[in-house]
Amino acid sequence: MEVIIKPDSDAVSKEAAQLFEDQLEKKPTSVLGLATGSTPLGLYRELVIMTHAELLDFSRAITFNLDEYVGLSGEHPMSYGSFMREHLFAHINLPAENIHVPDGLAADIAQHCADYEEAIRRCGGIDLQLLGIGSDGHIGFNEPSSSLSSRTRLKTLTPRTIADNARFFGSAAEVPRHVITMGVGTIMEARRVVVLATGASKASAVAAMVEGPIRASVPASILQMHQKCVLIIDEAAAGQLERADYYRWVYDHKPEWQRA
Ligand code: F6R
């Protein structure tokens, strides 16, 4: 895993935006896996600015979002469908028919999850998957103890994730208990993975992900097995990494041909 430590969240967003630019330049028809939450907001702002400056073209891209709350329609203001429209989709030239977000109101959730997996397969698999990390080490909404080979399915949020996400709702009581999420196995099949983390509240999850043992208690730790995973974090999120100096040294000495 490549670990890139940047001074602050702005620099994290800019570094990640470079990866998206590089990906879409190399393959305009890229299949992009997208995340919601606070962490990618700066990146999405960058992508919007770059699209308006005609540095980015999403017209042939396809997207699949990681997750959605069960019980919320894609129109509900707190749904991840609404989140994506507000922060990205409404501001870039991505055709509506190329957007995929799990349906929180699906009547047959198991069938919907199987169809979501099939849709990813039909599009040729995910080229670049964007992830945040939960303070409990989750990726997507694969909470601790999730199977490390799981596929898209229904999950129950932990009380900790519900408390973390209460800031988007009026209170913890209003946060749905269930979600549809891509599985850990689904995420691991992406050709390239970029994980973003900012702030001291993510420091212990980041350390467990990068330097701890691979275990279902920290689903993000399976990314140690991914051949093309880059973690871009700010100084605060890097605060508990034992080998932070080495990661900085590697980045500073990266051969030119390896840079995006
Ligand atoms: C969101 C998602 C989650 C978040 C994680 C971090 O689609 O899949 O794994 O990335 O909960 O959330 P924030 O960025 O709000 O700290």
Image (cartoon, helix red, strand yellow):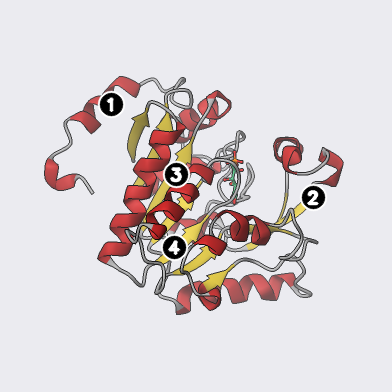
Can I make out residue 180 in this image?
Answer: no
Residue 223 image position (x, y, % from top left): 43, 45
Residue denoted by label 4 = 32
Residue visible at 38% across and 34% down in the picture: 11
Please report contact status of discs 4 and 1: CB closer than 8 Å, yes or no: no
Please report contact status of discs 3 and 2: CB closer than 8 Å, yes or no: no
Residue denoted by label 2 = 177
User: Label 4's element?
Assistant: strand
Please report contact status of discs 3 and 1: CB closer than 8 Å, yes or no: no
Q: Is mark 2 within 8 Å of ligand 1?
A: no
Can I make out residue 17 in this image?
Answer: yes
Q: Sequence order check: which comes first, mark 2 or mark 4?
A: 4
Q: CA distance from mark 1 to mark 2?
A: 39 Å
Residue that protrudes farthest toward the left in the picture? 256
Q: Sequence order check: which comes first, mark 3 or mark 1?
A: 3
Judge the density around disc 4: few (<14), some (14-19), many (≥20) Cα neighbours within 10 Å.
many
Quarter of the render that holds ligand 1: top right
Residue visible at 33% across and 34% down in the picture: 4
Please report contact status of discs 1 and 2: CB closer than 8 Å, yes or no: no
Q: Nearer the viewer, residue 18 or 116?
A: 18
Give the amino acid type for the residue marked by disc 2 in the picture.
Arg
Residue denoted by label 1 = 248
